[in-house]
Image: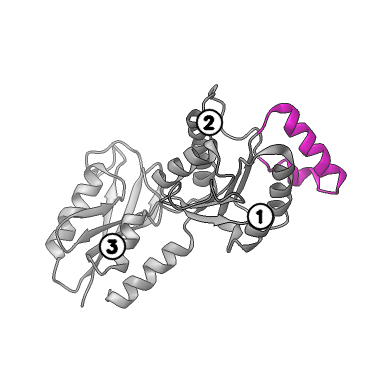
Amino acid sequence: MNREALRELAQEMERFKPVLVICGGGHVGYYIAKMGHMLDFEVVVIDDRESFANAERFPNATVICKPFVEAIGEIEHPEACYFTIVARGHAHDTDCLKAVLDRDFAYVGMMGSKVKIKVVMEHMKEVGYDEALLKQVHTPIGLPCSAITPAEIAVSVAAELVQVKNTLNSEGYVGNDVTQAMLRDEVAVIARIVEKKGSAPRGIGSTLVLKKDGTVVGTVGGGNVENLVIERAKELVGTDTTEYMDCNMISKAKGNINMVCGGIVKVLIETIVE
């Protein structure tokens, strides 16, 4: 693979990166943004108050200081967005929810007490939103874990985001460290899972790169599979090679590589030519 093709592949991976849109830059939104960044979401924070919507408060996010409805309407590719509504007051919650439901979304969750949620949902029905659509709203937001503090609520929200994202997306995980290495021309060898059977730990599309400096970022599953892929990648550095590696993790099968995950993956290994 040449450098130009590698950059195009990285841009393609970036296009499908999940975006976490946080409607509300208050205490809960602050911690959700931290968790979203840690989980490798592209984070966007919306608030109409400059004291809450600024780069100093959210250094790892794109911050939009505008009215909620206007800002949500400007979000590109909403079908890849995970909207968390943690604004102040049910009026803002209602406005945000209408703006999200009028567009596409991958996930929408709304924080609130049972009373507030009931008031908002009854209003949504009264103004004509279909009940089936409203059932797609995750509310109360987050997985149940008896969360109390803003940080604890953020943990429950993050858990739900991961659950939904990994249910919706059957493709493998590719982190920022991988795509940035590809875009910066730091890669010597790239390895990607192209076929998967059974309960292998990583899905199709999972990517690992061996950088020019000998370090590795990304993953194709860890354990012996990853060790074998990395060893082979190092052997191929400086060559013009494209090859496939079959990794069998079924414990009783012929050619097992001393793993008991129970799956089979095929890894495509490609060197990068200048």
- Residue drawn at x 79%, y 34% as measured from the top left: 119
Q: CA distance from mark 2 to mark 1?
A: 24 Å
Which image quadrant for residue 241?
bottom left
Please tell me whether residue 158 is drawn above or below residue 194 in the rendered image.
Answer: above
- Residue at left 74%, top 47%? 133
Residue range (magenta): 112-137
Q: Nearer the viewer, residue 249 or 239?
A: 239
Quadrant for the N terminus, please.
bottom left
What amino acid is labelled 3 in the image? Answer: Ala
Q: Which residue is mark 2?
A: 153
Magenta stretch: residue 119 in it? yes
* Numbered disc in front, either 1 or 3: 1
Q: Is residue 257 left or right of residue 195?
A: left
- Front residue of 25/268: it is 25
Q: Residue under label 1, please give it.
A: 67
Q: Residue at x 26, y 38 (%)?
A: 259
Camera-nearest label, 2 or 3: 2
Question: In this view, which residue lies farthest toward the front?
Answer: 51
| Residue 47 locus on image (x, y percent) | 59, 49
Q: Residue furthest top?
A: 146
Name the quadrant of the C terminus. bottom left
Does dot 3 land on a helix, a strand or a loop?
helix
Q: Amino acid at mark 2?
A: Ile
N-terminal label among 2 and 1: 1
Percent from the top left, x then y, of residue 102? 73, 56
Indicate the position of residue 140 as horizontal and vertical percent values: 65, 32
Question: From the viewer's perspective, is 112 left or right of 61?
Answer: right
Above or below: residue 175 compared with residue 244: above
**What residue would you read off at disc 3?**
181
